[in-house]
Image: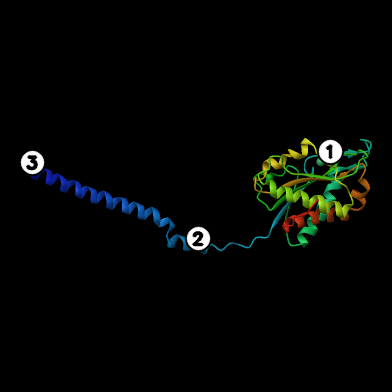
Amino acid sequence: MRIALIRRLQRVFLILSVILFAGIVFLAARGAAYFLPGSIDRVNLITPTPERETVALVSGHTGFDSGAICGPSNAPTLREVEVVARVADLAREALEEAGLEVLFLEEYDERLTNLDTDLLLSLHADSCIAASGFKAASPLNSAIPTTEKRLIACINSHYSAHTGLAIHANSITHDMTYYHAFRKVLPTTPTAILELGFLGGDGKLLTEEPERVAAGVTESVMCFMRGEEASD
Ligand SMILES: [Zn+2]
């Protein structure tokens, strides 16, 4: 009598086990279906559109303020925003001619937020003091330090070669290394701010030879975009 009962219970457990096992197999198969060839084919049908490499240029202070102003306040001789805009515009033209997509941005452009481009370069000019030289800086807490180090090396090498200006490194300020746009773009977007020269000591070059200054910017960008390792 007891043995018969045990045998019946064994059979019930066996049947329950089979049902449970079948259920697990069914659910596992459904989960796996997401990775089966059917869905892979669907992904492959989306042909990636060939994208041109995109460079974002910030024309410093545009849409916000004048930046540095030189000369008497009632009759200023130089405004940073205008000097930079001329150079930025020429650099944009040259980069577009070189086949790049250029995103031209204002100082506090909304598009800076989560910007995902191959490069963001912000152009500014330094104060009206009688000093000379340029300098470039990337975020201090960079998420891509090797890439941004290469970017700065490209600028230091090519911008100086085209403009004849020396690096004025000891005046890299907190404003540069903690530049507002650095915190807005995606951490994977390589970025730098370039002070093109001093409105004071380099005013003549910046205003009378903007093509030469723009060529320095363009060649710096092209060096980076071509993946070159410049030695500064
Ligand atoms: Zn500025």
| Closest to the observer, 129 or 228 | 228
* Amino acid on which the number 3 mark rests in the picture: Arg
Numbered label attached to residue 43: 2
Residue 71 shown left or right of residue 12 in the figure = right
Q: Name the residue under label 3.
A: 2
**Can you see residue 57?**
no
* Amino acid on which the number 1 mark rests in the picture: Ser
| Closest to the observer, 13 or 62 | 13
Q: Helix or strand or loop: what does disc 3 sit on?
A: helix
Q: Where's residue 95, x and y in %?
A: 77, 58
Image quarter for ligand 1: top right
Q: Where's residue 147, x and y in %?
A: 70, 50
Q: Helix or strand or loop: what does disc 2 sit on?
A: helix
| Closest to the observer, 124 or 189 | 189
Q: Where's residue 191, x and y in %?
A: 72, 47
Badge 1: residue crowd in 10 Å (few <14, some 14–19, many ≥20) = few
Which picture quadrant has residue 168? Answer: top right
Residue located farthest toward the left when viewing the structure as drawn: 1
Closer mark to the observer between disc 3 and disc 1: 3
Q: In which quarter of the image is the N terminus?
A: top left
Q: Mark 1 points at which residue?
A: 171
Badge 3: residue crowd in 10 Å (few <14, some 14–19, many ≥20) = few
Residue 172 shown left or right of residue 140 in the figure = right
